[in-house]
Amino acid sequence: MTGTIALITGILLVLIGLWGILTNRDIIRMIVGFSLFDVGIHIIMLSIGYVAGGTAPIIENLSDIGKSYVDPVPQALVLTAIVIGLGITAFMLTYAVNMYEKKGTLEIDKFEELKW
Amino acid sequence: MTDIIFLIIALFTVTAALYAMLTKDRTVSVLSAGAAGLFASILFLMMAAPDVAMTEAAIGSGLTTFIFFFALRKIRSSRNG
Amino acid sequence: MVKKVFILLMIILTGLILWSFVPGYESRTALPEVSAHYVEKGPEELGAANIVTAVVVTYRGLDTLGEVTILFAASAVVGLLIHLNKNENKRRREGSEILRTGTALLFPLILLFGIYVFINGHLTPGGGFQGGAIIASAVVLQVLAYPNRKIGHGLLSVIESLSGFTYVLLGAAGVFLTVNGFLDNRILPLGEYGSLLSAGLIPVIYTLVGLKVGSELSSVVISLNGESEEEQL
Amino acid sequence: MVDPIYLIVIALATAFALGLFRKAPSLLPYGLTLAALAVMTVISGSWAYGILSGSLEGTDIFTAGFTPPVSINLYMGSLEAVLLLLVNLTALMTALVLRKEVKDTSVYMLMLLLVFVMGLNGVIMTRDLFNLFVFIEIVSIASAGLIALRSNLEQLGAGFKFVIAGALTSGFMLIGIIFTYYTTGSLNMDVIASQMSPALAATGYTGLFLIFIGMIMELKPFPVNGWGLDTYEASVPAVSALVAAGTTSAMFYAFLKTSYMSGGLFVQAAAVIGGMTFIGMNVLALQQDKSRRLLGYSSIAQIGLAVLAYALVALYRIENGEFIVFALILTHALAKALLFWLAGIVGKDSIHDWGVIKKKMILIAPFAVAVSALLGLPPFPSFFAKWDLVMGLAARGGMVWIILILSGSLLEAVYLMRWFGNAFKDSFNEEDTLDWRFGTVLPVFFNMTVLLALGYLSASQSSFSMGFNWILLGAVAVLMVLDFLPGIIKNLLLMGAIGYYGYGFVMAAESYRSVFAWIFALGALITLLPGFGVKGKRMGFYPSAALMFAGLIGLIEAVDFMGFFLSWEIMTLGSYFLILRGKDSKPHALSYMLFSLGGAYLLMTGFAMTYAGTGSIALGALVKAAIIPHSGIIFALLAVGFMTKMASAGLHIWLPGAHAEAETDVSPMVSGILLKAGVFGLLMTAISMGEQSIGPVSLPYVLSWVAVITALVANYMAAMQEDAKRLLAYSSIGQMGYALFGISLMSHLGWLSALVISIVHFIYKVTLFLAIGSVAKRTGTRNMYQMGGLITKMPFTFFSVLICIIALSGIPPLAGFSGKWIVYNAVLEKRWMLQGAVAGAAGIIAFLYLFRLIFAIFLGQLKDNHRKVKEAPFFLILPQALLLGLVMFFSFLPGSLLRPVGEILEEFTTAGALEWQGNMAISDYGYWNGVAVMWVFMALFAVFFLILTINGRRAQWIKQFNIVFAAERPARPETTHFSYNFFAPVRKALGFLEYPFTTNFWNRVSDFLHAVAGFCRRIYTGNGQTYLLQMVIFVVLSYMLTKGGF
């Protein structure tokens, strides 16, 4: 049950993030949308690795080998994904700051210098 | 029982995320997104993923929010200057 | 308005795509083969109690190297844009007395905590990335408290470069010392299971990652705060 | 061998270490970066060499001391090695180009460059899904950083759009990866591929779909690629080069890997998306005049083509698929990087400002090579790839796709050739400068060399046998290298080469081929003679001429479709460059190229269908093709293709301008010689396939009407011209109409007439173009009403024109008559009286223009400003003299021409063949004794000459200005010239013939396409958010269409 709830929560967060990305003209809030989108994906990923009744894959004694653990792989992937997400967010924000300094606005539809 | 707590926190997460997208105020939006990240990290903890929970709390929710604020501050200061 | 309804429709349809996965989903009861291998053989093979760390640092070490690279690239982009758009600094209001005193007290403590987190990554939850982020938040405090103090990239950049360089070299050492052993942690003895100095190269790598991530994130924060890169810490 | 993992180690270690050199002089980190990239190039190069030469085998690279799937593994195989070499080499070259930027960007740019390259290496090698995702993110961040190298508003905007689009894409992909992990329990692509089954594909559909759509969106499919176009346009050109060559190639390979992983689950969708992208981008590019954005359009289109090719290869199980796909990818990468670097050297964004490239004439060569390679012209790998693909598709019934690929290619030719023409012809501002440095120039020429070398290699790899003589292309290459020599020396070399090779070639040619072999070889030598009179280096002329003649010779030598088509394209390319050299020839050269390519694609389709029906690509298969299904369509395709070259009515609008505006000695080449290639091809088709029909419509019958209409209208148009060279050009169209008519008669006499007309038209048209060309050169005008009385100044030229027009008008006694005589015999035999009547009418009109030619130019009053005009230079007269000798020979002994040619044709049909009694030809309807006619004519001539001379004594000489003008001087003095609007009365009667039906039709086609492009490209609003929405819609629609619901 926990897994399913998490999966649905993740999907909802992805959709909410998508909604934010597609409807906010403000670049900062679009970026917020992206970070929610990311969080949603992370939750989905973890729900995939969840094993009902499993414990965290930290084996303090070698004698504990063989107990039920949750899948460590998705956790490792999420760990990576979170850090990548941070990198991308920082990156986008730097761009946003520089765009603001050049143009004095943060509305996405004002940045149409290049088209067609 | 844990399922119910889990469900409640999941609801909190979704609500915080929704609020982040619906509010008009940038700052509030960034803060609610951070809150959503924090709730998510509780979910992670409950899903037996302490490593991820810690990362999400420190990076996904904490540092990201900081960076948002620094960026906002810089934007504000360049508007004033 | 029409546009928003249309977007909503698209998002619902996207939701339907994702939803198609839900009915077939059930929480696993057993681990996939590879994960089972990690959980059952991991402790003996790599000597790390925290299997997630074992996966992150060694089994999927290439991912982690890539991850470090992404942060590195992001901070290089931040550095590039700051470098290209140097503008004069405006004086900012100093942080309050409480904040400054608090920072003076907390700064070393947070630093220490960060170091603790990444050194123990192979034993307890946490590791290089989390520790690095914690160190960076110490720098955030510092910046908040003394917004006009010039904290430069000089030292940070040296730490970052050296730790990154060493990380890659240690990884490559595996290719020299063992067969196909890029990023193999077993080029150092595995040590006593569960102790600080165990799991071969893992604590070393996590320390390097922690230092690198910490310095990178710090310089991103400092860059965004608008300081130039000329001054040193 | 060095472990490939060092590619990643070296790039990363250097990138990380660069941080230490922040304060050091910029040369140090720059040198380190170059060294790292060089080492990486060497490593990947040695692997590529080792694997391709067979001394090494593809190898797995394990990490962490474990074997997969426990740890991540990479793979180094032949494809990987080649792509890695490509990427690392391009990066090294790009680093050279970026030398100037190092100072402003501190070490950051170098760090990003290294990280970028490392990411690309990883994308190519990795076999792990999530690892692929990580590397894609690295590439995406690093390239987004490099986009903002100058940090201006355009770059920031473009970079931001790029990042958000990338984030959305990778988000979808990540969800797909984790779903796939759930269903398969693995992240290793090989493991997943080995497990893949229909059942698994069904349960894991969503995951696999999301990975597919994510990878496809990395390739910037139409229409969700506005962000990609922006980045190509905004970035520093060197960065765009690396993105276009490196990122797209690596991402494409990653796409292939994931596609194999899912067992080809989405190839149909890939085919549709690829085809849509190829066509869509090429249409939209029509309206684009910013060079780098144009290159962006073209890049995306080419990747679309590669995706399409991959999908078709999989769907239709086409052989040699790997070659097809990777030849396309490699050619594109090399050519596109070259063009972007060139854009950096030129430094102008608008394609109308590219004339400045002529400041360094030598840059035209790489430009031409790159454009030709992109268009899939020979000898580049893309040519062989397209050929193999089209043949394969035809054999498996993929006609729709052939049409799509070829029409897309034609559209691409429109804008690329237009751009090239602009650069070559447009004037430029002397103050503009080129970024001419070692670092910027070396990469351009390096890639050019690689492209040429690959062309040679891929020809030997092509699965179809090669009926082409590479010696001739070798000569072209030698002339290109020796282009710095004086023109006279190059001319000697080329003539020597053609003479030497041509002798054996003409001797070896059999049957009707020998007729054309004579025309081509002799024509080449004769038309090259005037070149001795041109001083200076004449850069580019001789390689182009050599290219054209190589193609012509190759046509004759070809034994299979491949050799024929290859020669055809080479000939077209060479003649295009020649025509482009003319002063005002820009638009005409473009339309020439487009019609030629269009025609060539029809030929290709026809050949492909023949191959499909007969299973053979030998030219002889055309005979077998006569009895397969769709033989009528094959005949029609080939006929229209060849008729494009012959400029038959409806397909002729390129000719008048192209032939009239060409240089004095180029006009005879293209008019006198080149047109015969079309006759040759059509004759071959007609002889091989015989009478064909589509449904109840007999194709020769249709052709005959097209032919006589061509003759009639073209002759009329010729009569109405004021420009003497245009007159000759129209006259050529008319003559080719006769040749077409002869072929369409499908009889011995008909074909004989076509051959004879080809021969005599070659002789007369070369002579006339040389004569009129020298008049135009001496008087400085081509308008006939500005000439007059030149008989005294240019007597030899007058004589040569006189002889030619007598011959050309087809009246006795000269050789031109023999052609006409045979035609009418053949008409009588076929009972096509109506067509014969129209052809006769056309012949009468021909008198009008021929008469005018001699009258307006040479008779009448000499113009004041022509008093100092001299006779044509020796090297223009010499070839005329030679040809006139030939005319006289054939005229006195018509049998010497008709007999052997007729005998050749008896191999195919003897019905209605001429019989010979001494010098007398006897047909079923009469006889003709050329020698007797000649003597009679001479006698009559002598009689009239005497009478006139005697009477001439009584003629009164008046002074030139013994004319009294009344009242005022007219506003347009030329209207009073006696030869201005010479045939005004005729015009009153037949003016409707001048209405430009054809021109208007083709203009409408062009306007329509441009309007479509102008309208459709509005989807690229420039708004990043709109782009994201388009991407979401794209994902949703693709899902619905591939799965058929949710």
Image (cartoon, grey):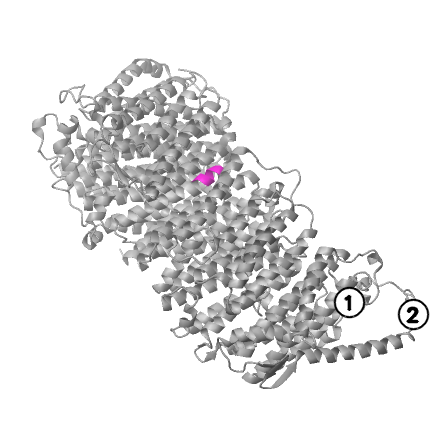
Q: Which residue is most to the left? A: A63
For the C terminus of chain D, the image quarter is bottom left
Q: Which residue is most to the bottom? A: D925
Q: Label 2 vs label 1: CA separation?
A: 21 Å
Q: Which mark is residue D957?
A: 2
Q: Which mark is residue D693?
A: none
The percent coordinates of residue B78 (x first, y second) are 48, 28
Left or right side of C159 for D197: left
Magenta: main secondary structure equals: helix
In magenta segment, residue D491: no
Determine the chain carrying the residue at label 2: D
In this view, the residue in front, D79 or D621, is D621
In this view, the residue in front, D242 or A71, is D242
In this view, the residue in front, B11 or B47, is B47
In this view, the residue in front, D522 or D369, is D522
Determine the chain carrying the residue at label 1: D
- Asked if residue D112 is positioned above or below residue D447 in the image, the reply reads above
Q: Residues within 10 Å of mark 2 (few under 14, many from 20)?
A: few
Amino acid type, residue under disc 1 in the picture = Ala
Quadrant of the rendered structure where residue D1 is? top left
Label 1: element kind: helix
The percent coordinates of residue D840 (x first, y second) are 64, 79
Quadrant of the rendered structure where residue D503 is? bottom right
Whether residue D654 appears in this view of the structure is no
Amino acid type, residue under disc 2 in the picture = Trp
Q: Are marks 2 and 1 in contact (CB under 8 Å)?
A: no
Tag in front: 2 or 1: 2
Give the residues in magenta. D238-242
The residue depicted at 53 percent of the width and 73 percent of the height is D904
In magenta segment, residue D240: yes
The percent coordinates of residue A7 (x first, y second) are 21, 43
- Asked if residue D219 is positioned above or below residue C188 in the image, the reply reads below
